Amino acid sequence: MAGTITIRKVETKRDRKVFVDVPFGLYRDDPHWVPPLKTEALGLITPEKNGWFSHAKAQLFLAEENGRVVGRISAHIDTLALTMPAEQGFGPGVGQWGLMEAESEPVFQALLAAAEDWLRAQGMARMLGPISMSIWEEPGLLVEGYDHAPTIMMGHARPEYRDWVERSGQVPVKRLMTYEVDVTRQFPPIVQRIIKSGEKNPRIVIREVDKSRFEDEAAIILAILNDAWSSNWGFVPLTPPEIKDVGVKLKPIVFNDLIRIAEVDGKPVAFMITLPDLNEAIKPLRGSLLPFGWAKLLLWLRKPKVKTVRVPLMGVVRELQSSRMASQLAFMMIEYIRRSASQDYGATRAEIGWILDDNQGMRSIAETIESRMNKVYQVYEKTL
């Protein structure tokens, strides 16, 4: 029997642990949900452990009904996002919400109302979400592709959430897509010809990263990323504290042959990051490294064998974008990584994305290599 829904703020360490535990109950029977490592999930919402909080603030909420915790949500404000051009999605007066989970629609609506009230009290005039919690983490609500598990750093959701969000008055503002491609087969002849042409060009070098020079290589990639993505919808520059955190988290799954940097005339102009799908390794751990999960994970990290690899980021400097060379560099990096992923890691498929719905260049590349759209994530907005 339904009871009174109470929404309260997360204020203690115990509250944060309860907040992290919420989806474990909601998704226990969902075969496609990947339980996050609880230590990682706690780090995300703990200011002392997440560099994003150096320029942002958040309020977490829990929903209770009949003495049980039945939902959660975050409301947050990124001060860097407030400084971005309004035509790129964020801008002055735009707050965000995310990490939403709820047992029922009344709980869902009560949580969204609490997030709205908090953002309005902070002076925000519009809200975007779900964004959990940075645009670089897990943006968007899954609206297509519920029938298979998400890859590393991508979200999952209950199908009913879409209707619940839209009945709350939120309207779609941006779609983010992922594409999957079979990496065991060669790409179409036209792509092979473009790659061979690039290999004959003495100006072009496609090289592996050198993990022993991790910080230097990361700086090169970040410089290209900030230039390549600066005019994209939702772009917010990464800060030094965030870069440090990302480095700590991703370094164990960085492998030289899965990340490539393209140089033209000796200058780095493009990159492609590919990661083995860590979700395949952590899914059986059910959120905990104890008692023996840590040993299994360490063994896996020595030389991962995976079904899937994910391409979370690609970038080409703006001066080359929309040029033939930009697509040529992209095809060359994709092909070299395809070979490594298949031959050395046992991968049979790759997931590319997310890709913005208006990024025609990347969508064209994805379609040319005969990939297919496999998931769609939706970002919503509402005037407060």
Image: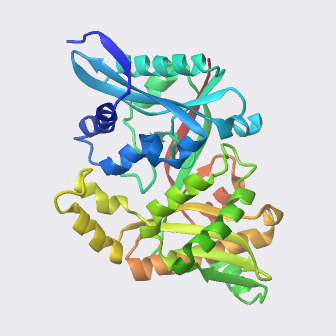
| x, y percent for residue 13 | 32, 35
Q: Give the side of residue 121 with respect to residue 9, left or right.
A: right
Residue placed furthest toward the right: 319
Q: Toward which corner of the image does residue 361 lie, by quadrant?
A: bottom right
> In this rendering, is residue 75 above or below 241?
above
Q: Would residue 372 be seen by someone viewing this image from the given angle?
A: no
Q: How did the renderer colour the structure?
A: rainbow
Q: Residue at x 28, y 39 (%)?
A: 27
Q: Residue at x 47, y 68 (%)?
A: 251
| x, y percent for residue 49 | 44, 48
Residue placed furthest toward the left: 291
> In this rendering, is residue 382 above or below 202?
above
Residue placed furthest toward the top: 4
| x, y percent for residue 258 | 51, 75
Q: Residue at x 40, y 47 (%)?
A: 43
> In this rendering, is residue 158 above or below 384?
below
Q: Toward which corner of the image does residue 157 lie, by quadrant?
A: top left
Q: Which is nearer the eye, 72 or 291?
A: 291
